[in-house]
Image (cartoon, grey):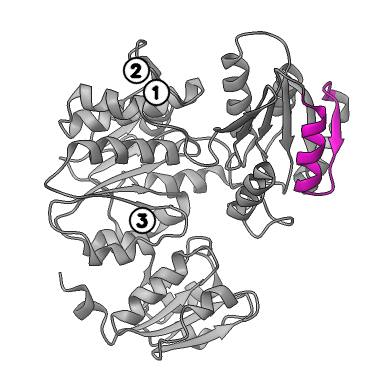
Amino acid sequence: MDYKKHFKGKKVTLMGLGLLGRGLNDAIFLAQCGAKLTITDLRDKKTLKPSLEKLKKYKNISYTLGEHKLEDFENKDFILKAAGVPLDSEFISHARQNGVPIEMDASLFAKLASGVHLIGITGTRGKTTTTSLIYEIAKKFFKKQKVFLAGNIRDTATLPLLKKVKKGDIVVLELDSWQLQGFGEAKISPHIAVFTNFMNDHLNYYKGDLDAYLEDKAQIFLHQKQNDYLIATPKAAHLLTAKYFGLLRHDPIVASKDDVPTDWDIKIEGEHNKDNIGLAMKVAEILHIPKNTVKKAVEGFAAVEGRLEFIKEKKGVKIYNDNNSTTPDATIAALKALAASEKNSERNIILIAGGADKNLTLERLIDEMNKTCKKVVLLPGTGTEKLLSQNAKIKVEMENAKDLKDAVTKASKLAKAGDTILFSPAFASFGLFKNEYDRNDQFLKLIKK
C-alpha cells in the first residue's frame, strides 16, 4: 500500500515519546509521511531532550510534555499508544468515548503490511533468543525475499518498516504482552505464532491479575485463521489448550529440547535455551528450511546481549551478563545453566542481583541461590528489601552494594580463579537506572574498565 498517502494529513496523537528510540522513530516516520502529529509524554522537556533534539526540524509536530491533556485525545484520526501505557488509562478511555481508534506500533504495521509473512514470538522468558534465532535461520536460507527483525527490539520501531518491506518478505516479531494488546485491538494474529512459556511476571502492571497477563499474551494466536500455525513448548501448549479450549483454530505444535540433536555443537548455555532452539526448528520446518541450514545457524548462534551472555574470562574468572533476567524465574534458569555447565557440585557463582520489586514470590530463587552461589552481592531496591526480609531462609552469604559500580567492585574482589561472576538481577531496573538497557550498558562499561 501507499503508506505515505495513508498517513498524509492524518491527525495523530503519539502517547509516550520516551528515550528508547521506538516512540522517536515512530514520530519521525509519521512526521515524514505528513501526519499532523501531537506528541504527549508525562516526562518533561529536560528529561526528553535527547529525543526532542532529533525532532526539531519537523514543523508538523506539536507537544504536550510533563502531563497529558484530554483535548489531545479528541478529534484525532487515531492515537498511537506506547507499549507501557495501560489500556485502562483515563486518556485512552476518553479517546474511545470520542470515537478515536487506538493503535500500537507493531500491530499497526501488521495491519498495513499486506502480503508480508509475519512470524510472532511471545512468552515470559526466551522470546528474544527464540526470535533472534528464527531470524538468523530464515536469513541464512531465504535469498529472494528479505527477512526483517522487529517488535520488541532495542532502539527500533516496527511501523517505519513499511518503507522497506515488499510482498513476500518475512518479518520476525518479538512481541511482549503490551504490544500484543494492539493485536487484540486490531483482532489480528501472526501467520506463525510461537509461545515460549508462561510464568509469573509484570504483576505490578497487571495488579496481581495473572489471567489478564495471559489474556494479552494469547492475542498472538486468538485471531489466527485455519491455515495459520501455533507452536509452543509442552507446558505452554498444555496451558493454552486448557485455557482456550474451543477458541484455538487448531492444536498447538509442540516443540521442546528433546527435538534438538544431541550431537549439535551448541554455544548458548542452559536447558531452557534448548527449548528455544526446539521452537526455532519447528518454525524452520513450516518454512521448509533444510535441517543442515538450521544446524549451521544454531551452531553459529551466540547468546544475545544481556541474555546469559559470556563477556570474558579474566584471571580464571568467567563473567556473564544476564541483565535482562528481571524475574526470579529467569535468574533461577541462569543459575541452573551455569551450575550445570561447570559439571561439579561446588558453589562457585558470585551473583550480582537486586532491584525493584515486581510483586513476585522469591522462595525458589532463595533455594537456588543457596544451592549454587558462593556469595550474593545485592543492588539497592524494593525487591532487595523484600528478599532480605526472608533472612531465615537464606543460607548463602549476602552483601549489600550502594550502586552497580560498588557491586562489580565487590564481586571482583570476592572472585578467585575457577569462580563465575553472574550479573542476573531478578528484579526490575526502576530507581537506580533509566531503564533496563541503561543498566545493561552501565554493567558492560564497568566490566570493560
Name which residue lies at 16% across and 60% down.
114
Towards the viewer: 72 or 394: 394
Assess whether mark 2 and mark 3 are in contact (beta carbons under 8 angstroms): no
Q: Earlier in the sequence, mark 3 or mark 1?
A: 3
Q: Earlier in the sequence, mark 3 or mark 2?
A: 3
Name which residue lies at 62% across and 45% down.
444
| CA separation in Å, label 3 and label 2 | 33 Å
SS for dot 2: loop
Indicate the quadrant where residue 30 lies. Answer: bottom left
| CA separation in Å, label 2 and label 1 | 14 Å
Which disc is residue 184 wearing? 3
Horizontal arrangement in the rendering, residue 124 relative to residue 296 (left or right):
right
Q: Amino acid at mark 1?
A: Pro
Towards the viewer: 240 or 328: 328
Classify 356 as above or below 409. Answer: below
Classify 333 as above or below 326. Answer: above
Q: Is residue 404 magenta?
A: yes
- Front position among marks 3 and 1: 1
SS for dot 3: helix
Classify 216 as above or below 197. Answer: below
Which disc is residue 234 wearing? 1
SS for dot 1: helix
Name which residue lies at 62% across and 75% down.
43
Instruction: Decide if residue 249 is in sight here.
Output: no
Q: Amino acid at mark 2?
A: Val
Classify 18 as above or below 67. Answer: above
Magenta-colored span: 393-415
Instruction: Decide if residue 383 is in sight here.
Output: yes
* Rendered location of residue 260, percent (x, y): 34, 17
